[in-house]
């Protein structure tokens, strides 16, 4: 009996390791886009990934045909949404997005909808169900995010250079 249990545990660990080897890079990239951190300095993204993978491993035996990547991505998105709510609400200090990041100009919900929709290819209906938002709200967030990225607000105009007066 013990040998069978040990064999199942070994098989489970090997399956999970294979999953992580194939999916962790993309999930980390997704998390990095969500947090708008630079790819070489992304502690919040790595924390999100760690939690998502730990949750997926804990549920590994209950997946029963469910895509583990989808499960990990859902957990990553939900955890980001909750942490962003706390950050926006001021309950937890999680740090601001990287100032040079293009996606850093977006509000967290806009960033989440945009990344799930465009980078991960998740449908608007699925995003609405995942986040518990009305479909119209998800569409509005996606539209606002695209508008912000395609038409960024103009910065202040450069101050005109004063012409030097010619000596008389």
Image (tube, grey):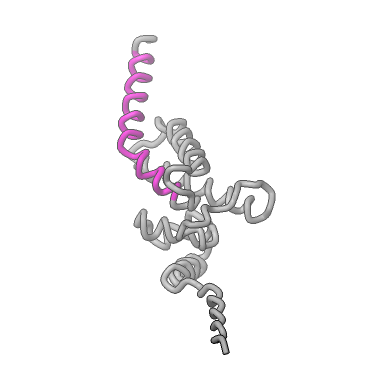
For the N terminus, which image quadrant?
top left
Q: Quadrant of residue 150?
A: bottom left
Residue shown at the point (47%, 70%) measured from the top left: 148
Residue shown at the point (50%, 67%) measured from the top left: 141
Image x and y of residue 121, in percent: 34, 57
Residue interval drawn in magenta:
4-32
* Vertical position of residue 10 compared to residue 52: above or below: above
Q: Which residue occupies the extreme front position in the image? A: 168
Question: What is the chief secondary structure element of the magenta stretch?
Answer: helix
Residue 135, visible in the rendered structure: no
Q: Which residue occupies the extreme top position in the image? A: 2
Q: How many marks?
A: 0
Q: Is residue 27 part of the magenta span, yes or no?
A: yes
Please state which of residues 19 and 135 is positioned toward the viewer in this rendering: 19
Please state which of residues 160 and 38 is positioned toward the viewer in this rendering: 160
Residue shown at the point (51%, 73%) measured from the top left: 153
Image x and y of residue 134, in percent: 52, 65
Image x and y of residue 72, in percent: 42, 42
Residue 18, visible in the rendered structure: yes
Please state which of residues 8 and 94 is positioned toward the viewer in this rendering: 94
For the C terminus, which image quadrant?
bottom right
Residue 29 shown left or right of residue 94 in the figure: left
Image x and y of residue 59, in percent: 44, 33
Residue 122 shown left or right of residue 46 in the figure: left
* Vertical position of residue 62 compared to residue 105: above or below: above
Q: Is residue 65 part of the magenta span, yes or no?
A: no
Q: Which residue occupies the extreme bottom position in the image? A: 168
Residue shown at the point (34%, 19%) measured from the top left: 10
């Amino acid at each position: 009996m013990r040998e069978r249990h040990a064999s199942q545990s070994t098989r489970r660990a090997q399956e999970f390791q294979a999953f992580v080897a194939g999916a962790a890079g993309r999930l980390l990239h997704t998390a990095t886009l969500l947090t708008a951190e630079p790819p070489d300095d992304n502690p919040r993204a790595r924390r999100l990934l760690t939690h998502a993978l730990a949750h997926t491993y804990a549920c590994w035996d209950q997946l029963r045909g469910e895509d583990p990547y989808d499960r990990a991505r859902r957990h990553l998105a939900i955890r980001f949404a909750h942490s962003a709510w706390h950050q926006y609400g001021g309950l937890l200090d999680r740090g601001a997005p990287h100032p040079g990041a293009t996606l850093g100009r977006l509000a967290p919900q806009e960033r989440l909808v945009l990344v799930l929709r465009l980078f991960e290819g998740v449908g608007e209906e699925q995003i609405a169900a995942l986040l518990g938002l009305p479909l119209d709200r998800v569409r509005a967030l996606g539209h606002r995010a695209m508008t912000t990225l395609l038409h960024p607000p103009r910065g202040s105009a450069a101050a005109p250079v004063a012409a030097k007066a010619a000596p008389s």
